[in-house]
Image: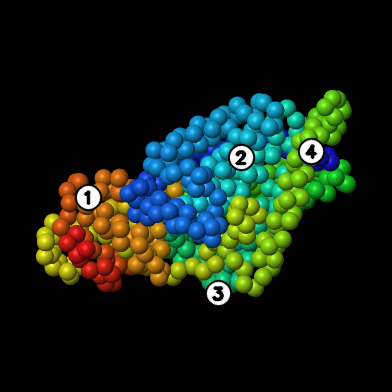
Amino acid sequence: MDGFAAVDFGFAREVLQRGIAALYLIAFVSTLNQFRALLGEHGLLPAPELLAWAGSSPRARRLLRPTLFLRVRYTDRRLVALCVAGIVLSAALVAGLPQLAPPWVPMSCFLLLWLGYMSISSIGQTFYGFGWEMLLLEAGFLAAFLGSASQPPPTLVIVLFWWLVIRLEFGAGMIKIRGGREWRDLTALMYHHETQPMPGPLSRQAHLLPPWFHRLEVIGNHVAQLGAPWLLLAPILGLWIPAPLPAIVGAAGAGVVIATQLWLVLTGNFAWLNWATIVIAFSAVGIPTGAPRHAPTVPPWSIDGLSLPWCAVTSAVAVLYVWLSVPAVRNLFSRSQAMNASFNRWQLANAYGAFGTVTKERIEIVVEGTMQQDADPDPVAGEWREYGFRGKPGELHRIPGLFAPYHLRLDWLMWFLPLGRMYEDWFAMLLVRLLEADAPTLRLLRHDPFAGERPRQVRAVAYRYRFTTRAQHRESGRVWIRDRRRVVVRPLSLGDG
């Protein structure tokens, strides 16, 4: 680093700008494919109803986060237009085209992505209530001030990305230390691979590893989240110590974070959370370029190769972040630490964290239908057929898929149902849409057992799922075994109202 300019972090900027833009592209594609069925005009939780409530009073309006749809009436067509525009703009940034222009051009592009996606997530209700939505918004805002190829990256913005990694990883580590006992007695990952929201193709193999390995996993997690993120700050010492050691230490810290995130990518599906962390951690990877440490000062006046107006803008952003980060710092060291919390309406300088506790058993809600009007309500009797979901466990022989960084929103929320959220409005409406054989809803699923016909009744049954042992798998070919618990939603038909 050299004053205002992080001259050795050009590669880091490339990874940040293109990587964050790629994540926005995936987020807009995910929204294009799912939002209308989940939250559109005829969705499970219609966004127009939320917007109508928000427009009913100034107080209600203030409770809703900023969204363009408070000024422009929501329609499904306008949602599609916004997603298509976001996809095109994200693709241009991935290709690096705006970055060839002056820094104000990529800045405008990233701010448009930030405002556009915030407009969607603000009305996404529970389907967008995940920490990685906030993380994507914050990363997109910061990426707007990384500049362009015509000048070196600003030091202050690179440091703000390190601060984001610290809040993300250290916050998650502290949530675990303060959370369930399983993180302190090193047993958490003896359960996690089996009970996580959406297992991946290698989750079963990871679960079957010996207990000593799972204890090492927990120790590695604590090192990666509580210690390694602070190493990212080491390059700051390069301002006073002209030696490669600070940069090496910072890159090593980033390497630890990236390695642990890649293990999570291999063993689960956490939408773009892990990929976003990997991209952001690259902010600490400096590669010496041999370029002059100080660019000549030419009109318009510049500082360390950065134009004076751009230095002023990035400095203002840094000052803003210092002010916005005060609640986040308090939260990090608070005994009542909040997880995935935003302290301002613009979702900047947030608190992050996940899996403060780990569930010990996997309960799946299986949705079934029948063509019989008065089918036997017993779960093991009658002509009941299961609906198949894309990501969540269902069929016992089916190996879990790899979907991340794509976000299967309906599948994720199905995991929360047995955790005290069984009777939420969206799930009741899902059952209604299945009774109606609603085509947009059925497209969210992997398998419709009635091939588009309306079932006469639907119900929901709780099962306990466990991974098969190696011997059980060799004998039956199954990935899962399950045992029935109880009917959690009795047979319903459209005539029930």
Q: Secondary structure at mark 1?
A: loop
Asked if the residue at tag 1 contacts the one at tag 4, i.e. Cβ–Cβ closer than 8 Å, the answer is no
Looking at the image, is mark 2 or mark 4 earlier in the sequence? 2
The furthest residue to the front: 57
Q: CA distance from mark 3 to mark 1?
A: 45 Å
Q: How many marks?
A: 4
Q: Secondary structure at mark 3?
A: helix
Question: Which residue is drawn at the image coordinates 54% and 38% (left, top)?
Answer: 22
Q: Nearer the viewer, residue 251 or 148?
A: 148
Question: Which residue is drawn at the image coordinates 39% and 67% (left, top)?
Answer: 421
Counting from the top left corner in percent of width and height, residue 306 is at: 79, 33
Q: Tell me the kind of residue under disc 3.
A: Arg
Q: CA distance from mark 1 to mark 2?
A: 40 Å
The residue pinned by badge 2 equals 111
Counting from the top left corner in percent of width and height, residue 308 is at: 81, 34
Q: Nearer the viewer, residue 203 or 50?
A: 50
The residue pinned by badge 3 equals 181
The residue pinned by badge 4 equals 311
**Left or right: 42, with 286 as reference point:** left
Q: CA distance from mark 4 to mark 3?
A: 47 Å
Q: Nearer the viewer, residue 266 or 225?
A: 225
Q: Tell me the kind of residue under disc 2.
A: Leu
Q: Is residue 186 above or below residue 92?
A: below
Q: Is residue 256 above or below residue 150?
A: below
Of the 4 image quadrants, the one containing the C terminus is bottom left
Looking at the image, is mark 1 or mark 2 earlier in the sequence? 2
